[in-house]
Structure formats: C-alpha cells, structure tokens
Amino acid sequence: MPIFIQAGGPIIWLILIAAAIAIAIVIERVLHCHRAQINSIEFLNGVRNVLKRDNVVEAISICDATPGPVARLVKTAILNRDKGRERVREAVEEAGLTEVPLLEDRLNLLATIGQIAPLLGLLGTIVGFIRIFIQLQSDGLYAHVGTFSKGVWEALICAAAGIAVAIVVHAAYNYLVNRVNKIILDMERAAGEIVNIVTENGNGK
C-alpha cells in the first residue's frame, strides 16, 4: 500500500483525505442513526399507559430517558397538552422541522465527496499523462518506455482510487438516506399518534 500511495503522486493524497473524511462522516452518522431509532410502538404504548393514570411527570421522565427524535416529539406534545389539539399538532410539527435537519446533517457533504472522488481520480490521471508527455519531450528520440512508468502508475492508481472511493461513498450515502427516511417515517407516525393520545385522555380540546 505505501508503494501505491507513493506512486500515485500528489493527487492520491487528496483522494485519501476525501476518503478519510467520508469514513468519519459515515461512522458518526451510523452511530447517530442507531441512537435515534427506537421501537416507537413500544415506546408510545408505555407513554399511553402512564398518561392514562394521569402521571404526566413519569411520562416526561420516560421521554427524557429515551434517546432520539421520536421521544422529543412526544415530550413536546405532552408539554403542550393543555393548549388544544391544533396547538399540540403545530408544536409537534415545529419540533419535527427542527429534528429532520439534525438527522440529515453532513449527508450533503458525503454526497459531495462521492461526486468529486472520481473527478479527483480523473485529475490524477491527467497529471500522470502530463508527466509522461513532459518526459517524452525531454528525452526526444532517446525516450525509453521505462522512463514513463511513473506517469503511468500515477494515472492508473489515481483513476482506480477515485472510482473505488466513489463507489463506497455512494453506497454508504444511500444506506444512510434509507436509515434517515425510516426514522422520519417513525416520527410522522408517532406525531399523529401522540396527538391522539394526549387529546383522547381529556388533555386537549
């Protein structure tokens, strides 16, 4: 591997930096999604049972102890339970608008890396061929194929690295978008259900 990096020229370092940033983003986003996704059905059933006993403090404590946007939406609904059904719905929608950008954070950067990685590979390929032609011009009739190997290696390694990084990053991006969409769907279902829960218990108007 060190030999390939050395033969890849200066552009390979840009590709490796982009790959390192992408790996850090993917790890952070996977952990974030893992913490954010809960069993919303079981969670809402627990909150409903507590609210039926008019134990609002315990319901809020359950929300505080549960990570993720679903719990925060439910807590918002509980805190606004005395302001009427429409106000509860509005408060939950406002909270949802705050939570979604947090779920999608850095995904645009990941997509950008996936798009520019093959372009960096292409740039490395062009730089490698420029190196070859400079050597050709310098050596003239005395040029030997062995003297061009450095430029050829640089071109091939950068092209392969750029494409490889793009493939992995695009796959990771699509996986994360799918995870985020599932969490958003859970949020929408939980939002509709918690509005019904706090109003059916006589807390809304």
Image (cartoon, rainbow, N blue to C red):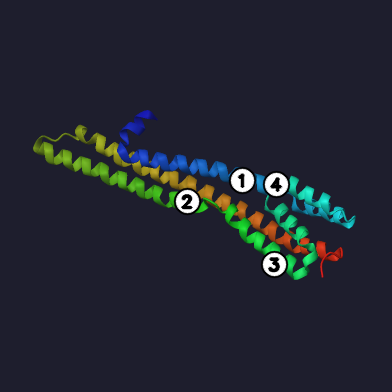
In 3D space, how far apart are the residues under numbered discs 1 and 3 (Cα atoms)? 26 Å
Q: Closer to the camera, 117 or 183?
A: 183
In 3D space, how far apart are the residues under numbered discs 4 and 2 (Cα atoms)? 25 Å
Disc 4 packing (10 Å; few <14; some 14–19; many ≥20): some
**Which of pointers 3 and 4 indicates the residue nearer the eye?**
3
Residue at position x 35%, y 29% from top? Answer: 3
Comes first in the chain, label 3 or label 4 = 4
- Amino acid type for the residue under numbered disc 2: Leu
**Which of pointers 4 and 1 indicates the residue nearer the eye?**
4
Q: Name the residue under label 4.
A: 67
Residue at position x 78%, y 54% from top? Answer: 41
**In terms of secondary structure, where does tag 1 sit?**
helix
Residue 149 pos. (x, y %): 25, 34
Q: Name the residue under label 1.
A: 32
**In terms of secondary structure, where does tag 3 sit?**
helix
- Amino acid type for the residue under numbered disc 3: Glu
**In terms of secondary structure, where does tag 2 sit?**
helix
Disc 1 packing (10 Å; few <14; some 14–19; many ≥20): some
Q: From the viewer's perspective, is 118 left or right of 135?
A: right
Q: Name the residue under label 3.
A: 90
- Amino acid type for the residue under numbered disc 4: Pro
